[in-house]
Amino acid sequence: MKKIILAAVMMSLVVSSCNGKQKETEKATNKTENKMKTIHLSKSDFLTKVANYETTPNEWKYLGDKPAIVDFYASWCGPCKTIAPILEELAAEYGDQIYIYKVDTEEEQELAAAFGIRSIPTLLFIPMDGEPQMAQGAMPKASFKEAIEKVLLKK
């Protein structure tokens, strides 16, 4: 009988501690929901939000309403994994000033080929005015911030 009571007490502790953890996780999730995040793009999203290179193949025409960064990445790429949290931080930090898009080159091979992506990560910095600029390889957060300030926000 003592074993049954002890087992029941232990089960109630386990269940209540899991529920407490779940509530803490839900609270943390609700706090971060208000922050901007990176936006994953398919080819069709890219054609409507960034540039429709199919209708104007010889002319760059950005379709967005604020500057953007497009990260061409792959899930297996080590340097891509290194910059992913940096890009998430920057998306939250810059909020509604810029978009940070992500294109999975494995899923969107045609899109990656259209931009001549041969090395990942490749980053496309798109200012509101002028031509976009490409950079290859992982960069530290400070370099991203400098590029955002100088190239995208022109500060």
Image (cartoon, helix red, strand yellow):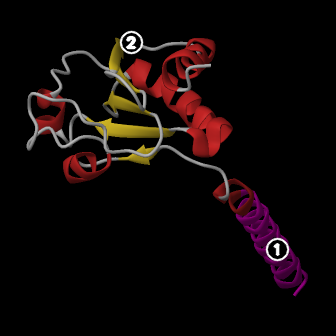
Q: Label 1: how many residues lie within 10 Å, few (<14), some (14-19) or many (20+)?
A: few
Report the residue at 87% width, 78% height from top. Answer: 9
Mark toward the start of the polypeptide (2 vs 1): 1
**Who is closer to the viewer here, 132 or 141?**
132
Distance from Cα at disc 2 to Cα at disc 1 = 46 Å
Amino acid type shown at disc 2: Gly
Task: Examine the structure image and report whether residue 26 is included in the region drawn in magenta.
Answer: yes
Residue 102 location, x and y as percent?
A: 38, 38
Image coordinates of residue 91 in percent, x first then y, are 58, 39
Q: State the residue lying farthest toward the right.
A: 2
Residue ID at (31%, 21%): 131
Q: Verify whether residue 144 appears in magenta.
A: no
Left or right position of 46 against 56: right
Question: Which residue is situated farthest in the front direction here?
Answer: 129
141 on left or right of 41: right
Q: Main secondary structure of the magenta part?
A: helix
Answer left or right for 25 relative to 122. Answer: right
Quadrant containing the N terminus in the rendered view:
bottom right
Q: Quadrant of the C terminus?
A: top right
According to the picture, the residue beneath numbered tag 1 turns out to be 16
Dot 2: what SS? loop
Which of the pair 124/12 is nearer the observer?
A: 124
Residue range highlighted in magenta = 1-28
Measuring 53% from the left and 38% from the top, which residue is drawn there? 98
Query: 10 Å neighbourhood of mark 2: few (<14), some, or many (≥20)?
Result: few
Quadrant for residue 105, please give it: top left
Visible residue check, residue 121:
no
Q: Where is residue 103, by image quadrant?
A: top left
In this figure, which residue is indicated by the disc labeled 2? 137
Name the residue at the bottom extreme: 1
